[in-house]
Image (cartoon, rainbow, N blue to C red):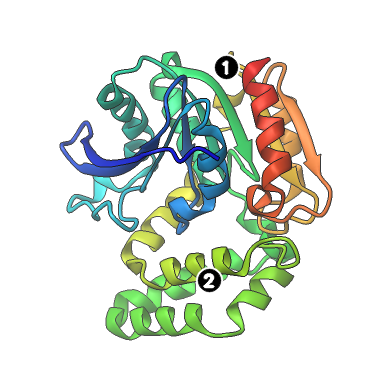
Amino acid sequence: MIKVEKKLGFFKSYDDHLVYYETRGKGEVIVFVYGLACLINHWNHQLDYFSATHRSVAFDLRGHHKTAKPEAKESLTLDALGKDLKFLLQHLQVSHAHFVGHSFGSQVILNGYKHNPQIFQSMTFINGFASNPIKNMFGVNLVEKFYYFLKSNYIQNPILWKNLWKLGVENPLTVPLTSIAGGFNVKLTSLKDIQVYVKGVANMDLDVFLSLFEELMSFDGDSILNSIDCPTLIISGENDKVTPLSFQEKMAHQIPHAEFLKVPYGSHCTQLDFPDYINLRLEKFIHT
């Protein structure tokens, strides 16, 4: 395989906030948008594959990893994340691109489409959702209650809860529990990929996570779905308990002429479970 040079940098968004990005290869641009508390590592297989034929781009969401947390609260919203997409393309000096979003990244893409539909050549949602998936997350109705419990206690004692967050995420039981809950398929996904993810979550600013998690719950992108007029592919993992299958089926039903693919044995990270299959399917969709 020919080694493709990776270029790193920062682009300045609408509010002058600096956002970290990476780009590989040449050709039509594909932008990969990861989910809440995730990291560019989630797209390694796709970035390696598509950089041979495309200009493959990934970036760190605001408050994630190499992109700093904005000082202003209004700069840490889905609106802000959606607007970043346009300024990323402006920095790359291209007018449009293919966008691929995973999980919460789907909401980022939908918000970006709401503001600037002209920049979208196509969009793909992997284990995504348009509106609040929390009530059925992991097959129970407890996640939203736990969020408000965590938030109220965090406000009272932020240092304690930041330490508890880090200890909880780094617990050795986290990986098997995440697998049981449908977050990963540990029989298919590389353990190294999961470990890198867990380390990234443990080091995440809890302020950022709580703020964006509330954005995730309050955002309603259903009204945007009917207006989408670019080619759209929706990929769902059969065993995904994080995003209920019904949310992805609903998106496929509401977006005109959307393609829908359900992947047997796929977890919430289908692109890590079956990278070769997802790459080939995505390639076919983009070239149709």
Q: Nearer the viewer, residue 288 or 164?
A: 288
Q: What residue is rendered at 29% in x and 78% in y?
A: 158
Q: Nearer the viewer, residue 57 or 204?
A: 57
Q: What residue is rendered at 81% in x and 54% in y?
A: 265
Is disc 2 surrounded by few (<14), some (14 to 19) or many (20+) residues within 10 Å? some
Residue 187 appears in the rendering: yes
Residue 207 shows which numbered tag? Answer: none
The answer to which image quadrant residue 22 occupies is: top left
Residue 156 place in picture, x, y as percent: 30, 80
The residue to which callout 1 is attached is 227
Residues under numbered marks 1 and 2 in contact, where contact means CB atoms less than 8 Å apart: no
Q: Nearer the viewer, residue 135 or 228?
A: 228
Q: Is residue 220 toward the left or the right of residue 57 in the image? A: right
Q: CA distance from mark 1 to mark 2?
A: 39 Å
**Which secondary structure lies at badge 1?**
loop
Measured along the vertical axis of the image, is residue 106 above or below residue 183? above
Measured along the vertical axis of the image, is residue 59 above or below residue 258? below
Residue 202 place in picture, x, y as percent: 42, 73
Measured along the vertical axis of the image, is residue 108 above or below residue 68? above
Q: Quadrant of the C terminus?
A: top right
**Which secondary structure lies at badge 2?**
helix
Front disc: 1 or 2: 2
Residue 94 place in picture, x, y as percent: 34, 17
Residue 195 shows which numbered tag? Answer: 2
Kind of residue at badge 1: Ser
